[in-house]
């Protein structure tokens, strides 16, 4: 199965000096974005509920990366994140709302309490962080970006993803509405909608291995071309588009949702 290597980051360090806060950055997509932004010169805040993991990633990025434990479902924890960023940097040019949990409950297996618990993290968590960080974003003078990591499940329906898909769908319109609210301040707000990405979230809940290694996935999505590029994505495949949307090349792009899914959405 062909697999292209990730594009080399620019030697120009085009995010030089910008403060980038990335939630859920201890692993997976968030870590990939954090590493790319650091290479491009950003001062990265690795925010994650996994404090030890956040510290490991920040240590790998070097100075002046900062690791902060945050539980995006806890308003006091989110407030503490904003306070830590304020104390260290005094501003924030880039916010990436990436932290989320996976959920695969369908309607018959889901209580209302379970539904609300998923939305509290995957939908409300991004709103909490945005509200807490907005004063620091407004304090920055230029090149201000908010990027929400949603999902292809937020723009189309699938079985056994009711709460997850609903939360991600809400973030799609949160992105569009927030872009309208903040456009006059030259703060751009966009979203990335990944498809099948090779991260820890792709591990099957029953311990049966990795989703992308199953026979049904290989048959439907690879052999029969449901993913036209014939492979699952990697965190680097998301980090590149994330860099673009947070760079000056995207200064006239706002309120948009970019699907990064190997073409799978084109086959439905």
Image (spheres, helix red, strand yellow):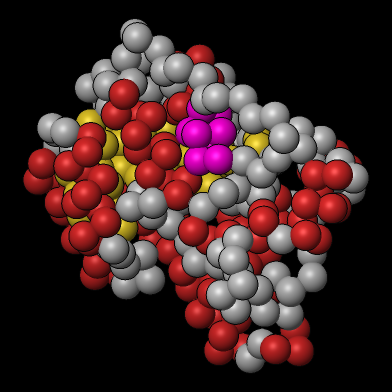
Q: Residue 185: x, y in percent?
A: 42, 30
Q: Residue 241: x, y in percent?
A: 55, 29
Q: Which residue is at a point 56% across and 85% down the rendered structure image?
A: 114
Residue 133 painted magenta: no
Which corner quadrant of the image does residue 31 belong to? top left
Q: Residue 71: x, y in percent?
A: 31, 67
Q: Which residue is at a point 29% across and 63% down the rendered structure image?
A: 50
- Let me know if residue 29 appears in the view: yes
Q: Main secondary structure of the magenta part?
A: helix
Left/right of residue 193 with respect to residue 24 in the rendered view? right
The relative height of residue 44 versus residue 127 in the rendered view (above or below) is above
Residue 235 painted magenta: yes
Nearest the eye: 185 or 200: 200
Q: Residue 178: x, y in percent?
A: 53, 45
Left/right of residue 175 with respect to residue 147 in the rendered view? right
Q: Which residue is at a point 50% across and 66% down the rendered structure image?
A: 101
Query: How many numbered callouts?
Result: 0
Q: Which residue is at a point 21% across and 43% down the rendered structure image?
A: 58
- Let me know if residue 172 appears in the view: no
Toward the top, the furthest residue is: 12
Nearest the eye: 241 or 142: 241
Nearest the eye: 9 or 68: 9
Q: Which residues are the magenta region?
A: 234-242
Quadrant where the image shows the N terminus: top right
Left/right of residue 6 with respect to residue 143 in the rendered view? right
Nearest the eye: 262 or 210: 210
The relative height of residue 85 versus residue 141 in the rendered view (above or below) is below
């Amino acid at each position: 199965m062909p697999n292209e290597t990730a594009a080399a980051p620019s030697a120009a360090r085009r995010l030089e000096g910008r403060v980038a806060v990335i939630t859920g950055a201890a692993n997976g997509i968030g870590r990939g974005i954090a590493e790319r932004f650091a290479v491009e010169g950003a001062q990265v805040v690795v925010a994650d509920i996994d404090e030890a993991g956040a510290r490991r990633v920040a240590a790998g990025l070097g100075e002046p990366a900062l690791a902060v434990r945050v539980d995006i479902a806890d308003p006091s924890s989110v407030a503490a994140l904003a306070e830590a960023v304020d104390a260290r940097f005094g501003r924030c040019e880039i916010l990436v709302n990436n932290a989320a949990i996976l959920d695969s409950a369908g309607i018959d297996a889901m209580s209302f309490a379970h539904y609300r618990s998923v939305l509290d993290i995957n939908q409300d968590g991004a709103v909490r962080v945005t509200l807490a960080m907005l004063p620091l974003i407004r304090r920055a003078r230029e090149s201000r970006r908010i990027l929400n990591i949603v999902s292809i499940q937020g723009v189309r329906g699938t079985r056994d993803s009711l709460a997850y898909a609903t939360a991600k769908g809400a973030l799609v319109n949160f992105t569009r509405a927030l872009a309208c609210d903040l456009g006059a301040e030259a703060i751009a707000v966009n979203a990335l909608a990944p498809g099948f990405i090779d991260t820890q979230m792709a591990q099957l809940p029953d311990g049966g291995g990795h989703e992308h290694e199953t026979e049904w996935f290989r048959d439907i999505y690879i052999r029969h071309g449901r993913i036209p590029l014939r492979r699952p994505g990697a965190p680097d495949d998301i980090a590149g588009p994330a860099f673009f949307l947070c760079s000056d090349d995207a200064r006239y792009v706002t309120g948009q949702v970019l699907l990064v899914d190997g073409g799978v959405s084109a086959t439905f």
